[in-house]
Image: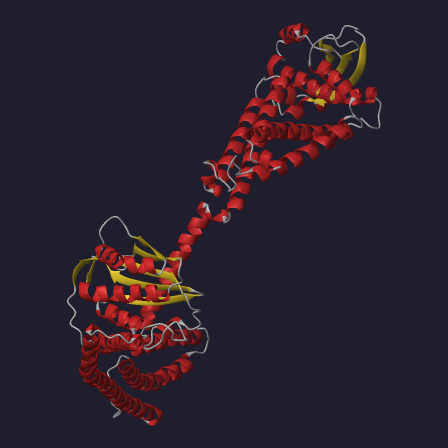
């Protein structure tokens, strides 16, 4: 089935067959309706012909009399010659009210059908002196109509005779043929809807040029075409075009209409498969534009209202309520007393409300100042009363309490920093001596193998302790901002390339394949190259220590929204069962067993150094995927 729905020849054949089957269905249904209407299934063919000929003869009789009265009443000989020369199976005798033959094409020929019609000339609305001035019985005309027994002329009567005989023969055959055509057209329609948007060798839905036209514009174009067809048919029906010509024109226009409707259905099916078909309409775009405009207007009004001072909002509300009340009072007949009461009520109520609102504004300003960090601000409670005054006093107490808490916190942080700095400095002096003496011992020729192992342990652990102390001091300085930052124009791509080059050997030893991706053009930021190198160094050190061997690590440099985005990604060797926020805290490591070297300060230092350079560092953990994202403003 997929081969057929994706095949262009199959679609073309289906469209051709669909047009044929739909035309057959339409003409079949129309034919069955006419057969039932003229009793083809209940009456003999002779009775049917009589009914058909009677309708045609009555129309011709009317035409004969009308033309005589309007064109040839004063020259009947010319009218006689015109009808005598016509090749027709219709014969007639036109008689006046006294029975005199005025015109006649009948000369005792054999006929198979005859009818007599009587008309009043006043029926034709010909109010001239000859007709309207005479009595009504003088204006009566009789037409004897005859249809030849043998239809020798090639006119509409012979055509009607032929099609009546043909229709009578196929009256039972047309029913199953029509049903079959309807079923076939339904099957073909379903196939074409399934094949809409399908292309050979492509599984996805592929829209064509028509599918990109707004759907409502496309439907309007179809309606315009339908209107033009209607006008064309109306014009052709008013001309002397033959019946065969009209039938051919109807078939051509019906074929065009079927193709256009099929095209509309197929493009609708394609749009539905693509999803959100209504979005590709002018109406949707207009509604969306209007909704956005209304939303912006509402947002602007809301923004203006929210940013108005509290007193301004209150004034607007009071004016609105006062106008509403005034309109209600104006609707009463006896409104003079109500208007006086309303005036004095507002005279007392409005100042009281404004006084309360002014107090609320003071409290609001105090809350805003304290929330913004101005702990020295004090609310003026001189003109506040009742609960408002108590609330102002509470706000002042909160400000004082927060000031004390902040001072205590700052004092604690300062003491903590000083303690770390002093202890680190005090430890560094003896540690330097230990490292130096271990270095001297290593240079001695020590034959005892056990003693050599002890010396190696001392050397390794003293170096680790020195690294820990250095990290501790650096973390303390970074968190307190006691590091000199010299921000300058820095090309971040070159710095990343140098960092990767520095760690190339170490990555190879740990079996980690590092992939660096960066744009071809240079990316410049304002940063301290020395501190930024320290950030990259810490992150690369983490990759080397904690990445799963024989895996890939990625460093990407991208530009997004005028920001340089540097992403470090690697697969962790250890299960990361802690959150990203915890990993950014001091002395926290990803390996909870702490069986690797490291102080747990690297990420904390990296974040502090990044923030000192007006950048951001975010950490994300997804299963074993460890990802760090740094962002800086680009120049």
Specify the quadrant that holds the C terminus: bottom left
Q: Name the spot of residue 234 as percent of width and height, x first.
A: 56, 27
Instruction: Kindly identify the residue that appears in the image at 42 percent across and 53 percent down.
Output: 288
Asked if residue 37 can be seen in this view, the reply is no
What x and y, as percent, mark residue 222? 51, 35
Residue 268 vs 248, above or below: the answer is below
Q: List x then y, in percent, for residue 276.
A: 50, 49
Camera-side residue of 562 and 319: 562
- Horizontally, is 25 left or right of 381 in the view? right
Is any part of residue 439 visible from this angle?
Answer: yes
| Quarter of the N terminus within the rendering | top right
Q: Measuring 51% from the left and 41% from the top, which residue is drawn there? A: 205
Q: Nearer the viewer, residue 420 or 214?
A: 420
Depicted 93 relative to depicted 552: above or below = above
Q: State the colouring used for the structure image.
A: secondary structure
Total number of numbered discs in the rendering: 0
Where is residue 235 shown, x and y percent of the image?
54, 24
- Can you tell which quarter of the image residue 479 is in? bottom left
In-image side of 566 versus 236 (left or right): left
Return the residue found at the far front.
Answer: 447
Residue 238, quarter of the rendered image = top right
Q: Is 326 situated above or below 57?
A: below
Of residues 530 and 609, which is closer to you in this image?
530
Closer-to-camera residue (396/456): 456
């Amino acid at each position: 089935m997929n081969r057929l729905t994706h095949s262009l020849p199959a679609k073309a054949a289906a469209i051709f067959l669909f047009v044929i089957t739909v035309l057959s269905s339409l003409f079949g249904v129309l034919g069955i309706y006419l057969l039932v209407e003229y009793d083809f299934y209940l009456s003999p063919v002779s009775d049917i012909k009589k009914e058909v000929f009677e309708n045609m003869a009555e129309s011709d009789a009317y035409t004969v009399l009308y033309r005589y009265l309007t064109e040839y009443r004063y020259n009947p000989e010319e009218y006689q010659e015109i009808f005598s020369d016509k090749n027709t199976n219709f014969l007639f005798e036109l008689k006046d009210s006294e029975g005199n033959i005025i015109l006649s094409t009948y000369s005792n020929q054999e006929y198979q059908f005859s009818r007599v019609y009587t008309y009043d000339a006043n029926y034709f609305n010909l109010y001239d002196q000859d007709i309207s001035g005479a009595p009504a019985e003088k204006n009566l005309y009789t037409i004897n109509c005859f249809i030849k027994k043998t239809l020798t002329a090639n006119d509409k009567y012979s055509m009607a005779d032929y099609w009546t005989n043909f229709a009578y023969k196929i009256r039972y055959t047309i029913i199953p043929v029509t049903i079959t055509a309807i079923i076939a057209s339904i099957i073909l329609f379903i196939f074409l809807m399934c094949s809409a948007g399908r292309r050979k060798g492509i599984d996805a839905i592929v829209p064509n040029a028509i599918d990109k036209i707004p759907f409502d514009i496309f439907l309007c174009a179809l309606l315009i075409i339908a209107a033009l067809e209607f006008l064309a048919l109306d014009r052709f029906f008013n001309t002397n075009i033959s019946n065969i010509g009209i039938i051919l024109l109807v078939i051509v226009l019906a074929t065009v209409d079927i193709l256009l409707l099929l095209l509309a259905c197929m493009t609708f099916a394609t749009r539905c498969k693509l999803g959100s078909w209504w979005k590709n309409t002018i109406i949707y775009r207009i509604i969306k534009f209007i909704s956005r405009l209304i939303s912006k207007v509402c947002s602007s009004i809301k923004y203006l209202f929210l940013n108005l001072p509290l007193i301004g909002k209150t004034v607007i509300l009071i004016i609105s309520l006062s106008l509403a009340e005034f309109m209600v009072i104006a609707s009463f007949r006896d409104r003079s007393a109500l208007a006086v009461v309303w005036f004095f009520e507002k005279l007392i109520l409005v100042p009281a409300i404004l006084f309360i609102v002014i107090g609320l504004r003071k409290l609001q300003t105090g809350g805003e100042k304290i929330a913004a960090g101005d702990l020295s601000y004090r609310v003026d409670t001189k003109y506040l009363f009742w609960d408002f005054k108590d609330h102002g006093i509470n706000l002042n107490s909160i400000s004082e309490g927060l000031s004390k808490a902040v001072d205590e916190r700052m004092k604690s942080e300062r003491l903590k920093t000083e303690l770390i700095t002093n202890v680190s400095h005090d430890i560094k002096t003896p540690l330097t001596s230990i490292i130096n003496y271990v270095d001297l011992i290593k240079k001695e020729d020590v034959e005892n193998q056990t003693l050599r192992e002890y010396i190696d342990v001392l050397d390794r652990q003293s170096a680790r302790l020195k690294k820990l102390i250095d990290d501790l001091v650096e973390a303390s300085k970074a968190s307190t901002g006691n590091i000199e930052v010299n921000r300058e124009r820095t090309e971040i791509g070159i710095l990343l390339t140098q960092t990767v080059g520095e760690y190339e050997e170490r990555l190879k030893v740990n079996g980690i394949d590092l992939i660096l991706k960066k744009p071809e053009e240079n990316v410049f930021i304002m940063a301290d190259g020395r501190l930024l190198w320290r950030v990259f160094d810490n992150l690369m050190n983490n990759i080397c220590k904690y990445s799963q061997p024989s895996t890939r690590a990625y460093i990407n440099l991208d530009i997004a929204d005028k920001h340089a985005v540097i992403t470090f990604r690697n697969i962790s060797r250890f299960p990361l069962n802690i959150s990203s926020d915890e990993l950014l805290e001091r002395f926290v490591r990803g390996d909870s067993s702490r069986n690797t070297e490291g102080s747990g300060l690297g990420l904390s230092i990296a974040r502090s150094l990044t923030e000192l350079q007006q950048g951001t560092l975010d950490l994300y953990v997804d299963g074993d995927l460890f990802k760090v994202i740094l962002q800086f403003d680009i120049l």
